[in-house]
Amino acid sequence: MSSILAYDLGASSGRALLGRLTDRKIEVEELHRFGNDPVQVGDRLQWDILRLFHELKQGLLKAKHQGIKLQSLAIDSWAVDYGFIGKNGELLGNPYHYRDHHTDGVMERVLGHIPATEIFGRTGIQFLPFNTIYQLAALKEADSPLLREADRFLMIPDLLRYFLTGEMHNEFSNATSTQLYNPLESRWDPELLRLLGLSSSWFGDVVQPGTKVGQLRSSVTDELGISSVPVYAVAEHDTGSAVVAVPALDRSFAYLSCGTWSLMGTEVDQPVINELAQELNFTNEGGAYGTYRLLKNIMGLWILQESRREWERAGMTYSFPELVKLAEQASSFSAFIDPDDPLFLHPGDMPAKVQQYCRLSGQQVPDSPGAIARCILESLALKYRFVLELTERLSGKQFNGLHMVGGGIHNTLLCQWSSNAIGKPVWAGPAEGSAIGNLVVQWIAQGELSDIWEARKVISDSFPVTIYEPEQFEAWEDAYGTFRRVTGLA
Ligand code: ADP
Ligand code: LRH
């Protein structure tokens, strides 16, 4: 039986999932999983891109050893990061991590000479200091030699796809995340490129999710002793793939893609580019089949991940389930943070940053891993309510519940608290949303599913969804008031 393969690279880990579609049911099997550990070299935080390519090849080897015939494969990953290819076809340097400090202050300086309304009006993309546009402006400011050598610009999945196939293409969903792509004119925005002094020749034609974009090249097939496999572009921005996989049957739905980041919003047919969207700093990221994601980034489980890493460094090793247990045992509603405070964006001693936030906002300071984990998770749930209300206001839709997908749904406490905070049901699943969204776009491209709505029905029939009903609404209502007061979220 033939299978298709989805590589999904998150900021914390990557996996290769095999998918089979039989009688309108999807079965998935995790073939390979690996850590994605960025590497600090001197002042720079970089992705270990060659290691990631090595892991993609390990996935292919595992398929070979299990005698699996692959019908096709595709890659999705976190957005905004990129590599440059030189004239000799080789990668120039290691891609920077979006949490690196080279963009500090750059967004503010760019906005000093290109008005925010101009950038938002041309792209519909939210202002995040690490957007590709500011990463490239940082290189320009630093007169980076990379820009003198650059011939082509490729986002992370474009780059890994190039390593696999030898062909260079820029994929649409990731292109929009750069804040350099104009969705109204369907092209890289020539005026923004000009104003920033970026060469338009670096940016290639943009291919849509569902396009066949090559075959495994002979250097890969010869090295691994395998046959060539067609390679597809899907919604290569992982959040784009995650939203494809939301098992919604109602066309008007709210989602939360919950992993390293929490991405909350709704799907729309046209980008919503107006004053309110800009003021609320919502984004319109391109998706599959003409859809856009009207959403907002929330800092997400990154804060817990980094806290865990810090405790580990100090010799206290906790698994995520252990941290959830400790949080459950800690006392409720003692202190809150605004997860989106810039304090939490960069790596560093996260427990100390949480404590600092609480101290400076005049709250009780959480003093144990359980109390810190509880503060983070309660604050996330309350921030979800805040952003869900903004999503309703901006989209003019009312949602009767929230779909949650992504690895974060393994945290059942967070799912329950999210439901408590929003006062509506949470429908949690599937956890491997991005990889499943990646698979179904390949099947649609090959005519095995008719469209995104048939795919969502098949996903809903194939994967269990856990329903969380709201509890303790009054206590959470009070907590929401305190949360807004201490965080200053009006
Ligand atoms: P990404 O794709 O962005 O790297 P994932 O979707 O894999 O992230 O989600 C990773 C997050 O999910 C972790 O940071 C952790 O907080 C949470 N998580 C994963 N497994 C569990 C678990 N068993 N219990 C609680 N939380 C979990
Ligand atoms: C989630 C994600 C998110 C981006 C961030 C950089 O993995 O792709 O949508 O904003 O990473």
Image: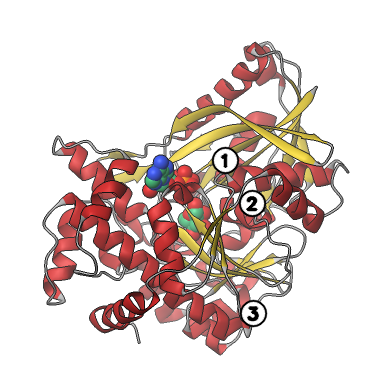
Residue drawn at x 73%, y 69% as measured from the top left: 251
Q: Is mark 3 within 8 Å of ligand 2?
A: no
Q: Amino acid at mark 2?
A: Ser
Residue drawn at x 76%, y 48% as measured from the top left: 458
Label count reads 3
Q: Nearer the viewer, residue 33 or 254?
A: 254
Q: Where residue 338 appears, x then y in whole percent?
A: 30, 71
Instruction: Report whether 203 appears left or right of 72.
Output: left
Cβ atoms at labels 1 and 2 below 8 Å apart: yes
What's the distance in space between the residues labelled 1 and 2, CA to CA? 9 Å
Task: Name above or below for residue 264 compared with residue 220.
Answer: below
> Pointer 1: what residue?
8
Q: Where residue 478 appears, x then y in whole percent?
A: 30, 81
> Pointer 2: what residue?
241
Is residue 53 visible in the rendered image? The answer is: yes
The 10 Å Cα crowd at callout 3, few under 14, some 14 to 19, many 20 or more, is many
Residue drawn at x 74%, y 51% as measured from the top left: 209
Q: Nearer the viewer, residue 38 or 217?
A: 38
Instruction: Report whether 312 appears left or right of 104.
Output: left
> Pointer 3: what residue?
272
What's the distance in space between the residues labelled 2 and 3, CA to CA? 20 Å
Q: Is mark 1 within 8 Å of ligand 1?
A: yes
Q: Amino acid at mark 1?
A: Asp
Q: Is mark 2 within 8 Å of ligand 2?
A: no
